[in-house]
Image (spheres, coloured by chain):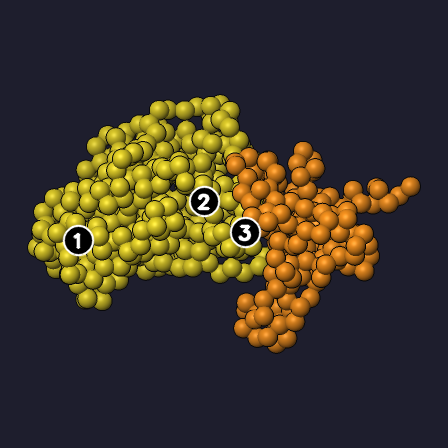
Chain colours: A yellow, B orange
């Protein structure tokens, strides 16, 4: 079960370290769960860039030590954008295995620094050397999706418009000013057809959740259960269909099977909207609509707050900001708020089942890691 | 693996390739092919060259896996260009004509304004950017295959 959670605002935090962000999120999570440091039996720390940017390794041990939680087993997890969600999956595995009663997951990232450079899948990989940067890999999907399904530039832009409409209700989000389709399309081109306002911003921030066994959860009055978690790698087959992401479709099918649910059972979704096209493609993999129907589904308002299945009511990566290691944890925390009825003005009425979906890394036109986590009350 | 002296002059002097065994010049002057592998056990074709088959881990042989194809998708990248690539630069996925592979690659910078899904392209080699140690180098590039025919017809 989810015992509790907490996070920092996702923003630029000049002058703060990744450790100070992590400590804030972890301390808030303990307070939210009503637990003490001694209750935490395992620590899992998701972070992607501290090694590259600051030369820091095994940061997780430092974070837990500074929170007064030494001695416990600590794992440092890096799965690109899916690091945080992979860490949650690992915590759930440890609890399912009976290894510990209670584990804290912290995802933290400090990346708004001058030396950030371009994010890619690794500087020694052939695709990177041939110019494959993150926006390009999604732009290539967008172009193919438009070609095969007639998805329009306006539909892509509407993802960002919806995202800002949602994030206006999330005080922890980085960008909260509403934008119009015209503004999204007129913002600087990053990798056509994707403009800057269709690309998630980098951010500093941390998010933490505490996962516990059902027995412990009942004792402390936790209300949100983890129904299923899954992590897979890509298949890397060649050729890859850039308009129908097979690893995504298969991962979602797997988590539905594990949770014993279908798309019709979902009340709220947080998905990996790294770029506008991502969200449209994930609707299709989640079977919220038929393949190719993502643009129309968005346009219909079904995935907006107030629609049948609201997606990324937090603002998602596009508006909340994307501190890479923290994102996957924050998705789970957002669903926890929604399922507890604690989401304030962005509450999805009567939400009982939520799904968090994330992807990280790029290899051979496929994702390197994909996670899906189903929570329910 | 390196082209003739004439090719080298046209394509960037004595610059080294981005990495060894990525492409090779063909018998026909000015033509290049991407170098990959064919599995000796299951016949699977892969790119780039790998001593082991990605499907069955069998041993492989070196093979030219494509010299031309059609453009499956493309984009023009306008962020700060990595590895000294021109700004902006174009990339895409190409369905190779000689195998079932869909490969990622750079597209001819001169074609940025005229890219279309489905257009025929061919492999060439250009001095473009630097390698991961900062040395200027040659990279394989897909260019519109019409270009070459037009030039060769008097």
| Nearer the observer, B134 or A34 | B134
Q: Provide the secondary structure element on which disc 1 rests.
A: helix
Question: How would you rate the neighbour count of disc 1 (Cα within 10 Å): few for under 14, some for 14-19, many for 20 or more?
Answer: some
Residue A293 in the figure: left or right of residue A327: right
Q: CA distance from mark 2 to mark 3?
A: 18 Å
Alpha carbons under labels 1 and 3: distance apart? 39 Å
Q: Is residue B135 visible?
A: yes
Does residue A371 lie above or below A164 as drawn?
below
Report x, y in % for residue A211. 20, 54
| Residue visible at 41% across and 40% down in the picture | A115
**Which chain's residue wears label 1?**
A
Same-chain status of marks 2 and 3? no
Q: Which mark is residue A65?
A: 1
Camera-side mark, 1 or 3: 3
Q: Which mark is residue B133?
A: 3
Mark 2 or mark 1: which comes first in sequence? 1
């Amino acid at each position: 079960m989810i015992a509790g959670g907490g996070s920092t605002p996702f923003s630029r935090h000049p002058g703060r370290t990744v450790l100070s962000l992590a400590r804030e999120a972890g301390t808030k999570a303990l307070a939210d769960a009503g637990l003490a440091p001694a209750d935490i039996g395992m620590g899992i720390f998701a972070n992607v860039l501290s090694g590259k940017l600051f030369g820091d390794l095994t940061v997780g041990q430092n974070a837990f030590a500074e929170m007064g939680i030494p001695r416990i087993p600590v794992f440092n997890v890096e799965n690109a954008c899916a690091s945080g969600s992979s860490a949650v999956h690992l915590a759930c595995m440890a609890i399912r295995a009976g290894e510990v009663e209670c584990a804290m997951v912290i995802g933290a990232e400090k990346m708004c620094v001058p030396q950030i450079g371009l994010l890619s899948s690794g500087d020694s990989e052939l695709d990177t050397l041939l110019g494959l940067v993150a926006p390009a890999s999604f732009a290539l999907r967008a172009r193919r999706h438009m070609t095969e399904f007639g998805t329009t530039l306006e539909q892509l832009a509407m993802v960002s418009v919806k995202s800002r409409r949602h994030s206006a209700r999330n005080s922890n989000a980085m960008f909260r000013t509403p934008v119009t389709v015209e503004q999204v399309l007129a913002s600087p081109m990053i990798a056509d057809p994707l403009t800057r306002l269709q690309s998630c911003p980098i951010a500093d921030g941390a998010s933490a959740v505490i996962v516990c066994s059902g027995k412990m959860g009942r004792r402390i009055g936790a209300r949100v259960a983890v129904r299923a978690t899954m992590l897979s790698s890509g298949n890397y087959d060649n050729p890859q269909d850039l308009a129908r992401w097979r690893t995504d479709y298969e991962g979602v099918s797997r988590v539905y099977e594990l949770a014993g649910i279908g798309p019709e059972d979902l009340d709220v979704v947080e998905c990996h909207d790294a770029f506008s096209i991502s969200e449209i493609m994930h609707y299709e993999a989640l079977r919220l609509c038929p393949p190719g129907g993502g643009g129309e589904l968005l346009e219909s308002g079904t995935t907006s707050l107030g629609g049948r299945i609201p997606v990324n009511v937090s603002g998602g990566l596009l508006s909340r900001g994307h501190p890479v290691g923290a994102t996957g944890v924050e998705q789970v925390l957002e669903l926890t708020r929604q399922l507890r009825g604690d989401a304030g003005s962005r509450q999805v009425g009567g939400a009982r089942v939520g799904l968090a979906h994330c992807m990280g890394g790029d290899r051979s036109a496929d994702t390197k890691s994909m996670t899906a986590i189903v929570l329910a009350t | 693996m390196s082209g003739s002296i004439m090719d080298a002059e046209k394509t960037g002097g004595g610059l080294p390739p981005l990495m060894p065994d990525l492409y090779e010049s063909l018998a026909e002057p000015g033509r290049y092919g991407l170098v990959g592998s064919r599995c000796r056990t299951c016949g699977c074709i892969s790119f780039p060259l790998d001593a082991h088959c990605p499907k069955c881990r069998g041993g492989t042989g070196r093979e030219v896996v494509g010299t031309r194809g059609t453009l499956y998708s493309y984009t023009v990248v306008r962020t700060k260009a990595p590895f000294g690539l021109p700004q902006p630069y174009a990339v895409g996925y190409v369905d190779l004509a000689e195998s079932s592979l869909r490969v990622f690659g750079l597209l001819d910078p001169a074609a940025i304004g005229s890219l279309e899904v489905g257009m025929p392209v061919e492999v060439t080699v250009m001095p473009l950017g630097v390698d991961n140690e900062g040395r200027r180098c040659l990279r394989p590039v897909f260019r519109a295959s019409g270009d070459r025919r037009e030039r060769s017809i008097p």
